[in-house]
Image: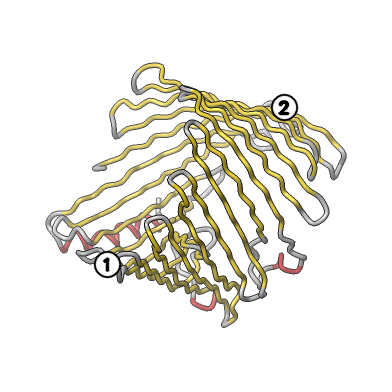
Amino acid sequence: MKSKASLAILLLTLPVFSAVAQIHISGSLHSSLYAWENAAQNQQWDYYQGLRLRVTPEKHANFYVQTNLRVARRGDPSDWEERVYNTYLNWRSTNRRLEFRLGRQFVYYGVINGTVDALQVAARPGKNFNLKFIAGTDAPLDRKLEIQDWDSGNVFGGYLSYRISGDAKLDVSYFQRSRRDDIVWQQLGTALTGKIKPNLYYQGQFDYNLGTSELQGLRSRLTYYRDKWSFSGEFNRQKPRVYEDSYFNIFELEAFNQFRCGITYDAGNYQLGLQNLYTSYEEDNSDVVILTAGTRWGTVGLVYQNGFAGDNTGLYGEIRYDIVRDLTVKIRSSHYSYERRSVQLSEDATSFSGGLQYRPTRPLLLQAEIQESINSFYDNDVRGLFRVNYSFNQ
């Protein structure tokens, strides 16, 4: 097998091997074999091999190489394909006030969101200040081990976090994407989080689209804890994330408003929960009620929905039980009865999965699972999944 991802890891780690005599290597290997049947009733076998690796020189603990990748062979006939989720070099100063990261990385700071091939600089000029800057190019959508040219998509962003007090923190972020000298995404965001009393927490977030001069997103949330009870309320106003040069931008992109409220109660070994989600669209609305009951070994939930997209009634559950030490059985199942308004058709859908999880030694984890779904397309769709995960030097 000729894998670009494996070659990249070798090239990144060889300089470290040759430069120092002692290094620390940690990470994990995870393999998966998936058996399923396609629409033509042909048996398919998919194989996935993942690697997460960190290499650190023993005498230079502030420097390390990090990677997370996957190779796969799916279907028949098929070719090996790779995905590189992150591969970067990281260095930070001894006092941890300055940090540099170069390579493929996933970033999520305020409105900065995505996988990029870039340079990230983080600084802590003061006890209550955190600064981050990032500049580079968009990673390919299929996460291939290749770097896009600057004109195909470049990014720039900045993030400032300031702790006003022990109970409040203010974040400000800016992010833009450009293609062929045109800015196709330009966002400014602010967020304020903290607590008013020891048991009352708040969150406020405001995202503004500078390119269209419109509100992109708004979120406000309150959570209150008292003894065994918790109460939460949330309001969201969200517009779809569509870049200015996207095909989908030819459609009118309406924001939706959503109200969430929930309550939970801890009754000894049990936890009861009730949640309501009301979503308002331009010409319709949707109302969802979710009732849950959980213990340390499982959860069961009841879902009821009406309004937009039809009525939906569902029941789902999950059991996770330790038969003996290091041997766990897991069972999941759900059944939904729903409508499809576009064709005035009611349907039922049932899914089930059951499996075992066994840890013969602490670094090694074995998992086997059977999955089945029954709906209008499949009378009996059975699939099998087997996983092996091995961690080293954790």
Q: 252 or 234: nearer the eye?
A: 234
In terms of sequence position, does the residue under pointer 2 or pointer 1 come before the other?
A: 1
- Measured in 3D between alpha carbons, the distance from the residue under mark 2 to the one under mark 1, in whole angstroms, is 59 Å
Task: Determine crowd level at label 1: few under 14, some 14-19, many 20+ residues with C-alpha closer than 10 A.
Answer: some
On the image, which quarter does residue 343 sit in?
A: top right
In the rendering, at what x and y percent does residue 77 appear?
56, 45
Res 37 visible: yes
Residue at 49% in and 49% down: 201
Residue 379 badge: 2
Task: Determine crowd level at label 2: few under 14, some 14-19, many 20+ residues with C-alpha closer than 10 A.
Answer: few
Decide if residue 250 is on the left or right side of residue 327. Answer: right
Placement of 182 over or under 80, stated as above or below = below
Res 354 visible: no
Decide if residue 123 is on the left or right side of residue 82. Answer: left
Secondary structure under badge 2?
Answer: loop
On the image, which quarter does residue 179 sit in?
A: bottom right
Q: 389 or 300: nearer the eye?
A: 300
Q: Which residue is mark 1?
A: 97
Q: Residue furthest front?
A: 197
Q: Amino acid at mark 1?
A: Arg
Q: Amino acid at mark 2?
A: Asp
